[in-house]
Amino acid sequence: MADLEVINNSIKSFCNMALDNLKCNINIVLRKTVAKEKIYRRIILKNGEQTIFFKSDERECNNYKYIVYVKSYGKKDYTKRGLIFYIVTPFTLFGKNYYIYYVNNFNSMVVYTQHFFERYVERHLKDNKSFSKDIIGLYLKDTDCIMADYNINHKRYNNCVYSSTLIGTCCGRKVTNNIILYSTFISKDTLEKGEKKIIYDKGKELFNDVFDINGKRIKFLN
C-alpha cells in the first residue's frame, strides 16, 4: 500500500488537473444541464418557494467525469441568482474510490472517500442503500452544502480536520491549503462527547445565522 505522502501527492495532482480541465471547459460540462433550464424553470415556478434538488446529469470531458447536481431555493432565489450547480468528479486511486466536490467558486476542493458516503448511509440514513451518485446527491441535499472546518491538534494524525455540518461531523485531513480529504462521517445522533461533538456544536451556532426560524436558508456566498 502507498504511504501517506504518495497518496496525498497523487490526490493533489489529480484534483488540480481535474479542476484546470473544468475551468477551461465549464460551458461544455454544463451544456447538457443548462439546455434543460426551461424544464427546471417551469418546475421551480410551479412550486413557489419550495427548495428543489433535481436529478443529476453526467458529462465526460477530456477523460474526466463530472456529475452535475442542480438545486433551487425557490422562485424568488431563482429569479435573483438562477440555477445553483454542484459539480463532483469521481476518480479511483490505489484501488479506492474518491469524489471531488468543487467549492468556493472553484478555488477549493473537498474530496470524499466512498467509505465516507457509506458511513453517511449507515449512520444518518440508517438503511442499506447501495452506494451510487444518488447517495452523493442526498448528502449534498441533507447538508445544504454548508460546513464549518476546524484544524485539530490530533495526537496520532497530522493535518487533522473536523468539519461541522447540519447533520453531523466530517473527519479527515488537509492535503493542501485548498484540498481537504474526508474519510468518515459521524451522525449528530451518535455524538455524545469529545472533540467531534464540540466541533459539531460550534458549527451549529454558526449555522443559526444562516437559516431563518423555519429552516429556510437566508445567507449565501454570493
Image (tube, rainbow, N blue to C red):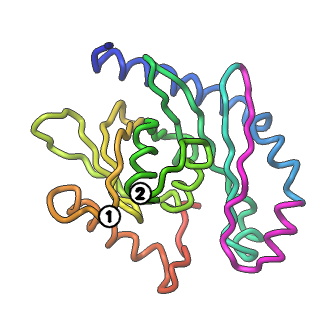
**Of callouts 1 and 2, which one flags the residue occurring earlier in the amino acid sequence?**
2
Question: Residue 147 has which mark?
Answer: 2
> In x, y percent, where is residue 214?
52, 85
CB-based contact (under 8 Å), mark 1 and mark 2: no
> In x, y percent, where is residue 131?
54, 42
Q: Residues within 10 Å of mark 1 (few under 14, many from 20)?
A: some
> In x, y percent, where is residue 91?
55, 26
Q: Residue furthest front?
A: 128
Name which residue lies at 75% across and 34% down.
59
> In x, y percent, where is residue 32?
83, 42
Quarter-of-image position of residue 39: bottom right
Q: Amino acid at mark 1?
A: Lys
Relative to 175, 34 lies left or right: right
Nearest the camera: 104 or 34? 34
Work out whether 216 lies above or below 84: below
Name which residue lies at 51% across and 62% down.
142
The reply to whether the magenta stretch includes residue 50 is yes
Q: Which residues are magenta?
A: 39-62
Work out whether 4 lies above or below 112: above
Image quarter (top left, top right, bottom left or bottom right) of the N terminus: top left
For marks 1 and 2, give the CA distance. Answer: 14 Å
Name which residue lies at 53% across and 49% down.
129
The residue to which callout 1 is attached is: 188
Q: Residue furthest left?
A: 155
SS at mark 1 in the image: helix
Q: Amino acid at mark 2?
A: Met
Relative to 119, 52 lies left or right: right
Q: Residues within 10 Å of mark 2 (few under 14, many from 20)?
A: many
Does the image show residue 178? Answer: no
